[in-house]
Amino acid sequence: MTWQMKRIWYTCIWYQMQHKIHGAGCENKWLCILIKEKEKEGNILKIGFIGGGNMASAMIGGVLNQKIVQADEIIASTKTEKSRQRLFDAYGIRTTLDNHEVVQNCDVLILAVKPKFYEEVITQIRDQVRENQIVVSIAPGKTVKWLEGLFEKPVKLVRCMPNTPALVGEGMTGMCANDRLTEEERDEVRMILEGCGKVEQVEEGLMDAVVSVSGSSPAYVFLFIEAMADAAVADGMPRAQAYRMAAQAVLGSAKMVLETGKHPGELKDMVCSPGGTTIEAVRVLEEKGMRSAVIEAMKACTEKAKGC
């Protein structure tokens, strides 16, 4: 931690004491204070998005809800006028159809287009990207080396993999960066990503595993919830009620893993009474190969990510 960041950290402790800030999220208040410090110095962080789809919308909504920046400090470009108007109406940010305008008016540039468009977009904007600008990629399978090659010059690059629960503020993002970013710049990017969920810094060699364990895994969980609900419907429960009960069971189970620190196997055993209904269900799941199916599916996902 640099001396500037230490100063901000101690300021944060004072701020928390003065304003009695406690509970979820208070550990990240120092990052917001970093932005306030920059504002006082006239160095307001400006964020740009190329692409205005679901993930861009989740990130924009997150940073605004967390008051990391103001709406007039965000600019986003879209391919169509309809999408541009939708973003403006939803968030009140600056919007444009011109990618070059975004690059010219931001400090952190987030490439939020589909992976197949990355080469086209980077080729289009690379001459305008500045030496002190941070470029953030959210595309699976696109390595830092590959991105650096497209820019054809030294660039501050962050590679991350968010997931769709970011749309409700409960995302999980893995991130890594090249060695051109300072510690403070890494923290700024992390702060932006934490606007819509949790963030873990990982080695780049693990980014494909991040795709399978958190990037794609909401689909597995949705499939599991749907299957549980289908079974409840088969037993006579109304479908809407079945979805609510299955989803809440998954949500509560995930919170137990995160908040108790207990091994998932131990938590499973706590539910399984000897000779009871739960262990009978677990026996059938094991017999049908659920554990192996999940592992094999994730291995396939990881391999696919490597080839993207």
Image (cartoon, rainbow, N blue to C red):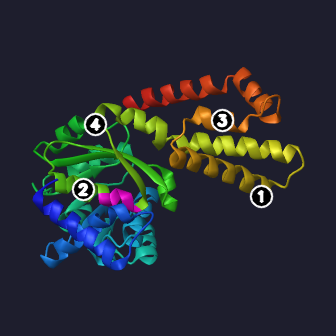
Circle 1 residue: 240
Q: Answer yes or no: do the residues labelled 2 and 3 have beta carbons within 8 Å?
A: no
Please report the residue visible at 13 percent of the width from the left and 53 percent of the height from the top. 127
- Image position of 95 (left or right of 151): right
Q: Answer yes or no: do the residues labelled 3 and 4 have beta carbons within 8 Å?
A: no
Decide: is 287 above or below 124. above
Q: CA distance from mark 2 to mark 4?
A: 21 Å
Circle 4 residue: 143
Please report the residue visible at 31 percent of the width from the left and 31 percent of the height from the top. 205
Say what amino acid the circle numbered 4 marks. Thr
| Quadrant of res 112 | bottom left
Q: Earlier in the sequence, mark 3 or mark 1?
A: 1
Q: CA distance from mark 4 to mark 1?
A: 42 Å
Disc number lying in front (3 or 4) = 3
Q: CA distance from mark 3 to mark 4?
A: 37 Å
Label of residue 187 in the image: 2
**Is residue 60 covered in magenta?**
no
Q: Pick whichever, 117 or 73, lies toward us.
A: 73
Label 3 secondary element: helix
Say what amino acid the circle numbered 1 marks. Ala
Label 2 secondary element: helix
Q: Answer yes or no: do the residues labelled 3 and 1 have beta carbons within 8 Å?
A: no
Say what amino acid the circle numbered 3 marks. Lys
Give the main secondary structure of the magenta stretch: helix
Disc number lying in front (4 or 1) = 1
Q: Earlier in the sequence, mark 2 or mark 3?
A: 2
Q: Which residues are magenta?
A: 191-195
